[in-house]
Image: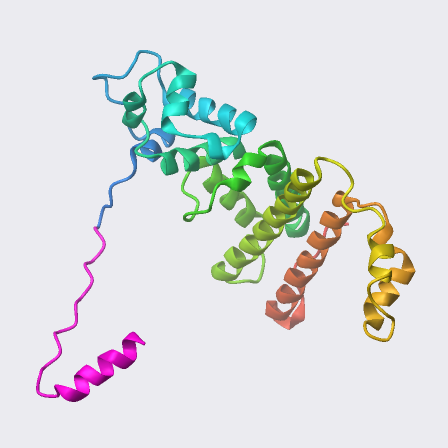
Amino acid sequence: MTYAIVRRLYAVSRDVKPPPPVTPPEPPDDPQLPPSLELLWGLREPGSRGPRPGLTLARIVGAGIHVAQTEGVGALSMARIAKELGVGTMSLYRYVASKDELLTTMVDAGLGAPPPPDGGEDWRAGLTRWAVGVRTAYQANPWALRVPISGPPLGPNNVAWLDNALATMAGAPLTEQEKLSCVLLVSGFVRNDVTLALDFAEASGGEPQMPGYGQLLGRLISPEAMPSLHRAIESGSLDDPDDPDAEFTFGLARILDGIEALMVARAPRGRAPRRKR
């Protein structure tokens, strides 16, 4: 609609020259880092004027994680954390500029450091170790999955996880962009796996999710209308007890198979790096 109106105005007033294009400003050569990032990376010390003695970014983050774990991310606010610490709300802003910045810092702390590589592991074993480690970290900090992703990883732990994953693919016959895309693919799979499990657990109160699902579907569809689904129902697969670990292992293996196929296509003479047996 807006485009149509603009076209009409321009058609009526052809003699009116359009304004010159606006050139967006160049990003600064040295963008200022948020105070919390500087503190996390050890690039500066908190100011000495005003803060309550003993108040540190680590204490603030720890209090935030405690509130998120026990009350949920929705209960989190700067005032709530200040109450948890017994300090004034404004004193927190010497360490974090906003609630969103605090949440990002909390997620970084909650994930912790990545597991170290096993000696002699190949790329597949390394990415498997990495994916299991990410899954374990999210399972221990489910509140982190309720924090929206607002940008690329910048905290020291998040960056270490990224470097750890890329290191497993150092010898792969892929471009650096392709390696990053593979890490993003695996990371998205892990995050989705844990998020679905969390959603189901919250919706069912920890009870099994709809037992007899296959039998219920069998009463709703006919073999003629949906023959493929009917075969799955008849096999009993939809009524098997759920095994989240088995589903995770299966899905991850299929993703890694796809990455391996890409390596075969990229490698000289169609040979990918060998797996360790």
Query: Compared with residue 261, is residue 139 higher up or lower down, i.e. above or below?
Result: above
- The quadrant in which residue 13 appears is bottom left
Whether residue 5 appears in magenta in the rendering, the answer is: yes
Query: Compared with residue 182, is residue 61 higher up or lower down, i.e. above or below?
Result: above
Residue at 61 percent of width and 49 percent of height: 192
Give the left or right position of residue 33, taking residue 191 as reference: left
Q: Position of residue 132 (x, y in %)?
A: 66, 41
Q: Position of residue 107 (x, y in %)?
A: 48, 35
Q: Position of residue 112 (x, y in %)?
A: 53, 32
Q: Main secondary structure of the magenta part?
A: loop
Whether residue 73 appears in magenta in the rendering, the answer is: no
Residue at 75 percent of width and 50 percent of height: 247
Query: Compared with residue 101, is residue 272 higher up or lower down, i.e. above or below?
Result: below
* Segment tinted magenta in the rendering: 1-28
Residue at 61 percent of width and 45 percent of height: 195
- The quadrant in which residue 99 appears is top left
Give the left or right position of residue 104, taking residue 172 as reference: left
